[in-house]
Image (tube, rainbow, N blue to C red):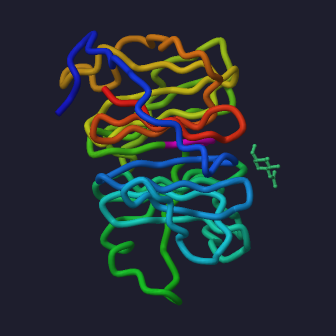
Amino acid sequence: RMKETGDLLLLSVLSVLNEHSGATQIDAGQGQVVMTNNKSEAFFLSGSTWTGLGSVPMKHVSVGPTGIWGVDNTVHFHVYSGQKLHQVDAGGQDQILGVTSSSTVHCLSSAAASGFKQGDSLSWTTSSRALMYISCSSHGCWGVNSGKEIYFTVNSHIGWVSVEFLPISLLMVEVGTDGTVFMVGGNGNFYQRIGISADVPHGTSWFQIPLSNNIKHASYDLGNLWLVINDGVIMKCTQ
Ligand SMILES: *[C@@H]1O[C@H](CO)[C@@H](O)[C@H](O)[C@H]1NC(C)=O
């Protein structure tokens, strides 16, 4: 369900998961939570315990309707002209999106992804929009570029529209399964998009959520907000 205008999150810190300081990135979706750390180890959360996701070094993992997707540290995940993905997002209903270190965006349909078996080659399509971080849900996809611009699309096959230019550097944007949107600035500040409605799916403005820590990464699912803060400590906040 989409949030109504001005519907802000009231956050309280539920727990700080210290045993895995060194976290670099976290992704929550479909009630599951996955993360990577600064040793390129990937984990998923079961109860309150992080369990290793195998022995392949990963630099980014994402969980969504088609399962858990990861970008490994080696050259296995070639997509297009030998470019390597550095971020992947599995939150979309019908697609998986990947971004390369040169900001090209690549899309894989869930149909192709669901039938994927080890050894198959994946057929990605490339978007014309250059973005350095993307996040999708069934309510659409959000992206940021290195030029401090934010983009939105209800369907990445149709094309991305510029939402706005912000005079701050942008680290990432994250859309939760329910369409709630957050943004992390390069300065570690944390924002929620407000004014999102069926008529204005990209919302109206950003509200800065005052937090005492610098935020490095964020993900939101089922009323839980997962934050990576200083030294890679994971904080779980709830609505
Ligand atoms: C990973 O992060 C931890 C916690 O901040 C730090 O102690 C450790 O030195 C880091 N390791 C690497 C390989 O960067």
Residue 122 vertical position relative to residue 186 in the rendered view, above or below: below
Q: Is residue 161 shown to the viewer in this render?
A: yes
Is residue 98 within the magenta segment? no
For image coordinates 48% across by 74% down, the residue present is 123
| 203 to the left or right of 16 | left
In the image, 172 versus 57, the foreground residue is 57
Q: x, y percentage for residue 60? A: 60, 57
Q: Quadrant of residue 73?
A: bottom right
Tell me where the magenta segment starts and ends, as one range.
130-134
Measured as percent of width and height from the top left, residue 197 is found at 22, 21
Q: Is residue 91 left or right of residue 104?
A: left
Q: Position of residue 199 (x, y in %)?
A: 19, 21
Depth check: give the residue in front, 170 or 82.
Answer: 170
Can residue 143 be seen here?
no
Residue 63 position (above or below residue 234)? below
Q: In this view, does 116 lie to the left or right of 101?
A: left
The residue lying at 28 percent from left, 54 percent from top is: 93
Image quadrant assignment for residue 231: top right
Q: Residue at x 47, y 14 (%)?
A: 209
Magenta residues, dominant SS class: strand
Q: Which quadrant of the view contains residue 225?
A: top left
- In this figure, what is the number of numbered marks? 0
Q: Say above or below: 237 vs 211.
A: below
Relative depth, front residue between 4 and 107: 4
Q: In which quarter of the image is the C terminus?
A: top left
Q: Where is residue 218 in the image (x, y as percent from the top left)?
A: 51, 36
Quadrant of the frame with the N terminus: top left
